[in-house]
Structure formats: structure tokens, C-alpha cells
Image (cartoon, helix red, strand yellow):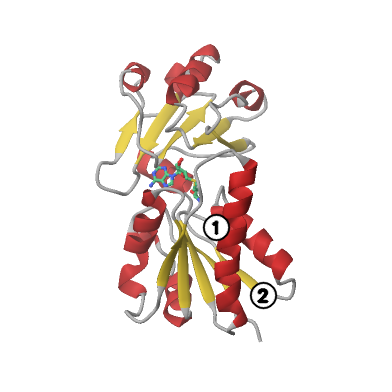
Amino acid sequence: MLGTLYGIGVGPGDPELLTLKAVKVLKQVAHVFAASSSNNDYSLAHHIVRDHLSPDTPLDQLAFPMTFNSERLEDAWQANCEKVVEILRQGKNVAFLTLGDPLTFSTFIYLMRKIKSRLPEVVVTVIPGVTSFQAAAACAGLPLGEGEEAITIISGAKGADRLKEVVSVADNVVLMKTYKQFPQILSQIRESGLEDRCCFVSRCGLEGEIVERDFERLSAMGQPHYLSLMIIKKRGIES
Ligand SMILES: C[S@@+](CC[C@H](N)C(=O)[O-])C[C@H]1O[C@@H](n2cnc3c(N)ncnc32)[C@H](O)[C@@H]1O
């Protein structure tokens, strides 16, 4: 008998945004894993759930390199997949922690694919989590979508090179991963004439939270924290 693989969304940072279902499953699993693609992911995910884990439940980090090099990534996925497969083969239920939601820009997606290809009969259960952009919209008091509006969520990891294409069809855009290519992202926003229509949110629900609508201040800010995103509303930002 194989154990079940649970992908658990732990929310974007505030431990009170952890769902009751996530807590219930965390109390039952035999082994917990979390990604350490950045120290933030691992330590924050652990911090969010620590009050709900039994001291006897092992918590291991799986190292994923922060790179677009497909060969290095493939090797890391394979090695990490084997660690999880080993525990599942012992018939133990395993939880993989994800910041926000497990099926939204998450390492869980890759891990789940790999594990399913190694163990096609494995049962995978996903416990959804509050996403970072839902929490950011709440914290900034900005509607993400209303009426017939279209919302598009894209990654800014490569500098928001798809922003122009996306704003031509979407009313509201969420740009995730705005930390590394921040100057390029600001240039894309400027070139699209959206300077007064964006709201930057960093470390939402955590110490050091920033909500900034002023484009000049954003331009002077320097590289933001890894946990940062941008909400862009084509029709304008309400204050
Ligand atoms: C690998 S993605 C994870 C997304 C996550 N699965 C979700 O559902 O929101 C990491 C990105 O999520 C965003 N993020 C996660 N937590 C955040 C927070 N507390 N405040 C602002 N952005 C956050 C940032 O854009 C960060 O670069």
C-alpha cells in the first residue's frame, strides 16, 4: 500500500489564513516536506504550520535551485521526487507544504507530476490555500475583478515581457514574482502607460508589509523582497 501525497496550501504568511482542512491533514500525516527554493519558502511555510505539527512529525526540506537551467532543475526534481517516493512506498502519508495555493505558481506542481510518473497509482489530494494575490488585494482594499472584468495572473520572473500583450485583453493583471527583474517590470509598466494604475504589495500579512501605489516611490525603492507582487487595474486604482 502506498501512502497518500497531500499538497497543502498554507496561505501567504499570516498563520490565521491556514485552512481548517490543512490543519486537520497536518495533524494526521506521517512526514512533512517543504521546498527550499529560497529560504523564505521553507522557513515561512514551517513557521505558518509549526503550532499544528506534532513534535514527532519529521519535517524535511527539499532543495530546488533557483535557476532556469532545465538540466539542473531536472536533476533536482528527480532527487527530491525519490525522497518523497521512498516515504510513500513505506505506506506513510506525506504532506508537501506550499506558500499560498499548491496549484498556483508552485513547486508542488512539478513534484506532483514527477511522483505521478514514478508511482502512477499514488493518490494525490490537494488542499487549496489562500493565494498571495487574494491576500494582497484584501490588504490593499482593491477588487480583483467585478462584473464582466477579466483577470490575468502572470509571472514577472522574466521581467513582465508579456505585460503589454496581457493588458490588451485583461482588465486587471496580477504580476507575481516581481523581485528579481523589478527595474524591467517598472519599465514595462511605464511603456504601457500604467504608472498610476498599479499597486505594489510586499510581505503581505507579515512583518515589514508594504503597500505602495506611488510609482515614483516604487522607482526609487531598489530590489524588493522575494514575497512581492503587483496588482494592475487598467481602469485605475481606487484609493
Ligand atoms: C513561487 S510563487 C508562490 C505563489 C503561491 N503559490 C500563491 O498561491 O500565491 C512566489 C511568489 O508569490 C508571491 N507571494 C507569496 N507570498 C506573498 C506575500 N506574503 N506577499 C506578497 N507576495 C507574495 C510573490 O510574488 C512571490 O514571488
Ligand 1 falls in quadrant: top left
- Neighbor class of circle 1 (other Cα within 10 Å; few <14, some 14-19, many 20+) is many
Which is more toward the observer, 237 or 51? 51
Identified by mark 1, the residue type is Pro
Total marks shown come to: 2
Mark 2 residue's CB less than 8 Å from ligand 1: no
Residue 27 sits above or below residue 233 on the image: below
Q: Is residue 144 visible?
A: yes
Q: Is residue 109 visible?
A: no
Q: Secondary structure at mark 1?
A: loop
Which is more toward the observer, 193 or 35? 35
Residue 87 sits above or below residue 45 on the image: below
Residue ID for mark 1: 102
Quarter occupied by residue 200: top left
In primary-sequence order, the first of circles 2 and 1 is 1
Identified by mark 2, the residue type is Val
The dot on residue 171 is none
Question: How far separated are the C-alphas under marks 2 and 1?
Answer: 16 Å
Residue 205's spot in the image, x, y percent?
Answer: 32, 49
